[in-house]
Every structure is written in structure tokens, then in C-alpha cells.
Amino acid sequence: MLIIHLIILASSLFMAALLRNMVKITNKGQIHYLFIGIVSLILFWNICSGFEKWFYDNKWENIIFVNLIYISVCFVPVVVLLLGIVFKVNSIKFNFKYFLLFIIPTVSIILFWTNEYHHLFYISYSFWITNMIFGKYFIIHAIYSYTCIFVGMSFLIYSAFKISGFFSRQMMFILVGFSLPLITNLLYTIKVITVTQDVNALTFSFTTVCFYIAIFKYDFLRVMPIALQIVVDRISNGFIVVDLDLRVVNFNKTMTDIFRNVASLKAKENIFKLCENIIIDIELFKKYIKTAHETNKSIEVEKQFIIKDKLEGFFTIEITPLINKNKHLGTVIMFTDITQQKEDLKIIKKQQEQITEKERLASLGTLMGGISHNLKTPIMSITGCITALEELASEYSESIGNTIVNDNDHLAIANDMKVNICDLKEHISYINNALTAIKNQVVNPDARDNSSFSLEELIININFLMKYELKSNRCSLEIINEAEEDYSINGDIGTLVQILNNLISNSIQAYDKISEVGELKDQDRKIILRISNEDNQIIFMVRDYGKGIPQHIRNKLFKEMVTSKGKEGHGIGLYLSYSKVKLMFNGDMWLESEEGKGTSFFVKIHSTNIAFSRRVIL
């Protein structure tokens, strides 16, 4: 008898310590509070059972502690049910329907305490459970209690199959812990075994031991018991888990939706049965899986699926080997639908092409206005040279046979002709450079995918095309070439000229309009184009000393179409320039600006040191 008292005492002390540790846990959730409730009820049950046993051994009246025991007996099954519900769905909102669960336990307690007046709960009470004679209401109490325990355990079992990792071991302890009191209660209820009242307290104490192991060894209550299948079914990516024989082990709902018009996914079927209606290189796919296993790394490929003779969509396929302790268990194949992304990229590309074309046409309009002005001077000079040559030719014809004209006169006429011819060459060279610059701006950049150009050619184009705009806005451009060598730049010269000219135009517009300023000199509206090299990279800096760019505009300049020019700007130029530098020259673009002191734009692009001979710019 003393041994049973010691066991009950040890169990009570153990649960008291467990309850203390549970209360000390911070950030407790519903599942923590429910477990604290179970431990408290079982602790109370143990204490009262100990006193009942002591009173029974001393043959004293013990009905008071029996009444107290039934508080735990009636409420533990309901708390077990709530624990199972919370474990399954994570959390619940305690409303009126959950409080209804406590009606029958409350009625049971009241009927037990008042049993001497009606004998509905028991007719004859005995410390030996098998000697008790139960009343009519006890059947309702028993059915309700066992139903609560059974449903709560069913939820725990259901959730255990949906949770991965160590949860299976945790659930083993939980199930074993609940199974012992459940089986014991069933056996003595149907009078298969003969036990005393304190056996219930001891069996549920065993439950607390199992819970203790689940909590502190496997960290049960620190891990949210989320149903894994619910999670994977709701993610946007589809996945299939296959074994080493490429047979389907598991898949999620998203994967079923992807192939709903092609095949029905079934466990244990070979994955390539899916490919019967899909045009895909099966051998290449097998090679990807083999490579992933050999390298122990994930492989990601992009594939376009054609299903049933029609274009179905684009997918990125990530193949990841499943490895446990250096042993290959299978493969996870993740499918991400990027069809909409592809369509969006096409729309964005088309819109950018339209914007680029509009910007190019607008710049050509400005360009033509400047060209007509820039070509007037050389054309008029050529006309003057031709007129002078005609006069010299007439003069020379008249001098033939004239005895007054000597050799010195012939030499003088010849020298004048040479001077005019040199002028003609200079003006024709200028026009030739102008036509080349115009052609570079007019020709589609796609027609010069593999072309390259030198820094010198770039400077010639910029000088010519910006001359008119600089002059009409009373600005001066100083080009400082600090590059140690001449460099070859791969790409379209017209595009880079357009980018740098756009930056120079922005610098021009950074100064006030001519009508808004008084007397000025060109050097007051200075713009610097500085060219330097860093390793095999060329850095272009366009610097002005204008009003600068506000900080809130500066942060958005290359990310969206914004402008600091009000109605006169649309923000397209810098946005497109940044995109072209990134995409067409694999470079970078940034700025430094201070309000009231000016702005510097930087363009960095890759280049190659070449043996271009430096030509003198005429």
C-alpha cells in the first residue's frame, strides 16, 4: 500500500514541476494553455486520489475527495478534445459553441455531488471500480467522455500524418500516453479487469510523462502543428516527389491543376507517363535528374511545354535531390509557371520599343533642325570655293598666250587654286562626317549588332550633333579625353551618341532659358564631357553647373519616368538611357547632384584597348 502512496506522491510532484515549467514559458499559445489545463486537472486528480486512498486505508469517510476527483474526471475529456482541435487547426476562436462542450461535464459534476438524492449517477459507490453500481445517467456521461477523448485523439492522429520531421516520434509519445488511460477505462467499464479508483490518476500520470518527453525532448509545443499538406497545396508552385525509379511518391494540388488537361497524377506511376501528351526531351530530362544526383545540387532549367499540339506555357523546372545521411532517397521536381511573366515581358518590350521609336523620331526632328544650320556654312563655303575656282580658271585661260603674264603669275593662280581645293576638301570632309553622324542616328541599332567604334568616332559624332543646340542655348561644351589609349567599344555608336547627347541636352536645360537671364557669356553656361578609363572600362562624365536635381526626383530617376522639368519634360530620356546602357552595353549609369551647384551624370561601359591610330579632328 505504501508503494502506491509513494507513486502517487512522486507523480504529483513531477506534474507540479512540469506545470511550473509550463507556466514559465513565454509567448504561450492556445495549445500551451490547454496543455497547462490538462496538467493542472491531472495534478489535482492525483492529489485528491492520494487523499482518497489514505482515507480508504484508514477506513474513514472519503466522499469529499471523491467529489473533488470528479471535477478532473469530467473535464479532462473535454480539454483533450479541444487540444486535438487546436493541434489540427492551430488556433480557434472560443465562442458560444465551444462553451456548450462543458454543459454535460458540468451536469455530470452536479449530479455526482447530489447523487444521494436521486442516485442517477451511481446507486452504490465503491473504491473498487468494478464493485460500483452505476445509475441511468452514467451511460450518458461515459459515452460523452469517451467520445471527446476518441475525437480529440483522432484529430491528433490525423494531424500527425500531415506533419513531417520528428513529429512522428512526438505523436508516438502522445498516442501512447493517451492510449493507456483510454484502454484501462474501457476495460474496467466493461468489467474485464478489477481496479481501484486511484488507477485512473496513475494512468493519466503516465500520460503526463509521455507529454513531458514530447515537450522537452522533441520541442512539441514550440513547433506550430501546421498540416503540411494544407501548406503545400496552397503554394503557387507545383511539385512532384519521385523515388529512385522515377515513380511518383507525392505531389500537391497545384501540380494536379497544371496537368489537369493532360493526365491524372497517380502515386507509384512513372513520372514520364505525364509526357505522353507533352512534347519534351525525356532523355534530356533524365540527364538533368542524374546530374542533380551526381552533383548533390539543385538544377534549374526553363522549358516551354507544348501540350496536345498547342502552346501551353513556359515553366522553370527545379530538380533537387533528396539526400539523407549521404543516401539518395529520391528527387523533388518543382514547376513554376512563368507564362504570364513571359507575356508581361513581351508587352513591356513592345512598349519600350514604341517609346524608344517615339524618342528617336523626336530626337531626329531636333537633329534635322541643327543639321540644316550646321550644313549651311560648309555648303556656302563650297559654293564660294567653286566660284573662286571658276574665276581662277577663266583668268588662267585668258592668260594663255598673253606675253604680259609671266611664270610668277601662273604660279600665283595655281597657288590660289590649291588653297580653294584644300578648303573644298575640308568642307567636304565636314559634310561626310555629318552624313555619317546622321546615318548613325537614323539606321536601326539592330542592323549593327556586331559593330564596334572608337572613342574618336564617338567624339566626332557628339561634336557635330550637339553644335547647333549648344550654340542656340549659348552653352559651351568642353570635351576632356583622359583615356590613355584609344578604345574600341562594342555596340551601336548611334545609341551611345544618343545617350550622351541626351545627358548633354539635360545639362543644357539645367540652366535658365536665354529669355530669363540677362547679359551672359558662354563660359557662364559651361558643360564638361570628361572621358576616362579604368581597367577595360570607359567612364563618361557629363557635368553642368546648373540648379541641380531635387533629392525626391533623384531617387526615382532611373527607376521610373520622372522629370524635374515640369511640363517641358516627360522623364523618358533618362529612363531609356539607363535601360540601354544596361542592356546594350552591359554597363552602369548613376548621378551625383547638389541643388544650386550642378549635376554630374556617369556612364560606365566595357571596352577594348585597340591599335586605332589617333586621327586629328579637323
Image: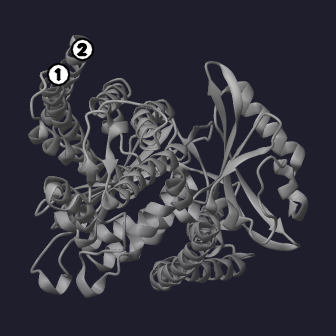
Residue 473 position (above or below residue 594): below
The residue indicated by pointer 1 is 57
Residue 93 in sight here: no
Instruction: Name the image quarter holding residue 307.
Output: bottom right
Residue 263 in sight here: yes
Q: Position of residue 441 (x, y in %)?
A: 57, 72
Instruction: Name the image quarter holding residue 335.
Output: bottom right
Contact, mark 2 vs mark 1 (Cβ under 8 Å): yes
Q: Secondary structure at mark 1?
A: helix
User: Taking 197 as reference, is 370 left or right?
Assistant: right
Q: Position of residue 292 (x, y in %)?
A: 71, 33
User: Residue sitting at 44 percent across and 54 percent down?
Assistant: 151
User: Taking 585 as reference, is 595 left or right?
Assistant: left
What is the three-letter code of the residue carrying label 1?
A: Asp
Dot placed on the residue nearer the N-terminal end, 2 or 1: 2
What is the three-letter code of the residue carrying label 2?
A: Met
Residue 137 position (above or below residue 123): below
Residue 477 position (above or below residue 182): below
Coloured how? one colour
User: Residue sitting at 40 percent across and 57 percent down?
Assistant: 143
User: Residue sitting at 73 percent across and 75 percent down?
Assistant: 400
Q: Give residue 258's mark.
A: none
- Give whichever of 96, 60 is nearer the camera: 60
The residue indicated by pointer 2 is 1
Q: Position of residue 278 (x, y in %)?
A: 85, 62
Instruction: Name the image quarter holding residue 78.
Output: bottom left
Location of the N terminus (image quadrant): top left
